[in-house]
Amino acid sequence: MARCLPPIPGMIAALIGEPSVSSADPRHDQGNLGVIHRLAEWAEGLGFRVEIDPVSPGKANLIATLGASSSADIPGGLVLSGHTDTVPCNPELWASDPFTATERDGRIYGLGTADMKSFLALALWAASAFEARDLQRPLVLLGTADEESSMSGARQLLARNRRLGRQAVIGEPTGLKPIRLHKGVMMESIRVLGRAGHSSDPSLGANALVGMHAVMGELLAWQRELRERHRNPAFAVDHPTLNLGAIHGGDNPNRICGACELLIDIRPLPGMSLPALRETLETRLAATLAAFPGLRLEVRPLFAGVPPFENPADAELTRTCEALSSHPAGAVAFGTEAPFLGELGLDTIVMGPGYIEQAHQPDEYLPLAHIPPAIDLCTRLIERFCLRD
């Protein structure tokens, strides 16, 4: 047993057994304090100084520090970061209880095993090999709230300018390969508002569906332009994507449609600005609807959005993670908290056990074979960035 810690399977099982679903739908949303307090107890047993930072009712970030605090004399050290929440699930589709860690076929099954409670347990296990007095720079274990919904935990750190270290590794499931780029995420609601009336006489109303047809045509034209103008060969899908995801409008065949809503998703490449994209979206659609008297446009973000992320290829942490993992740093399409830590000035890499393909679906699992190399990676990162001047 590591100093003051349960066995690793027990740690993972304890975290999985603390439900911490975050969701934009309040019917599914839960707090994360069970996970936070469990991690805090283990961290305190290892000599970490623990701060539980409230984010919203029932939700908090964990900031646990081992070794000297960062200062002008002792520059920030390493942050090992993970989110403490999960997505909702459908228990009836699982082969076992999603809130009970179950070992079979060389895997640990459970909600959050890959994405990403297990990483926090493995990071603490690696930290247990070190004494605070031995660290030249501090080690920080960061557990955040609401990554799967609003990213409010990471946004709060940025709003308060909480720079916790110099380097950060976010243990999202990447197959233990370093990731230095990812796309951003925007989700927007587009509403066309008209006037309902009897379908026998078009002059009695203004048809929102007709306007939305023109809006969709303009969006598809913009989609083609984004693909032609922006490319990055590091990504499997090497261009920005714009997806028309859902549409709702009208209520009866014999009524002129008075309102129609379209929901879209945009995934921009690094170097593209979310505010600039939003401004372009609104300008283009307003110009399109100007040709339709009686119709008006409403565009609003469904959430604040996640900026695209890029860490320099020649950054010290990038090179170190490539050397330790024996893999070149790559790119992914999914979003993480990396842009927020990067904006705080941290050299940031995404790298952790498990595979993103297992996340957000029934029978999520972590391969048992990933546990020893994940602990070894964390241990060697601590040695590199906390033990050396």
Image: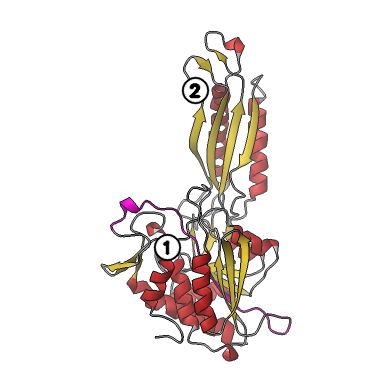
Q: Which residues are magenta?
A: 70-95
Label 1 Cα neighbours within 10 Å, binned few <14 / some 14-19 / many ≥20 = many
Secondary structure of the residue carrying tag 2 is loop
Query: Could you tell me if the residues under marks 1 and 2 are in contact, i.e. CB atoms within 8 Å?
Result: no
Q: In the figure, 186 relative to 13: above or below?
A: above
- The C terminus: image quadrant: bottom right
Q: Quadrant of residue 60?
A: bottom right
Predominant SS of the magenta segment: loop
Side (left or right) of 372 relative to 217 = left
Q: Quadrant of residue 160?
A: bottom right
Side (left or right) of 69 relative to 23 = right
Q: Amino acid at mark 2?
A: Asp
Residue occupying image coordinates x 68% and y 35%: 283
Q: Quadrant of residue 211?
A: top right
Image location of residue 278, percent across then percent down: 64, 43
> Is residue 373 shown to the viewer in this render?
yes
> Is residue 170 shown to the viewer in this render?
no
How many numbered circles does the render carry? Answer: 2
Q: Residue 112 has which mark?
A: 1
Image location of residue 280, percent across then percent down: 66, 40
Nearer to the camera, 292 or 155: 155
Side (left or right) of 118 relative to 256 = left
Secondary structure of the residue carrying tag 1 is loop
The residue to which callout 2 is attached is: 251
Q: Amino acid at mark 1?
A: Gly
Nearer to the camera, 198 or 135: 198
Q: In the figure, 358 relative to 220: above or below?
A: below
Image location of residue 298, percent across then percent down: 64, 33
In this view, the residue farthest toward the top is 200
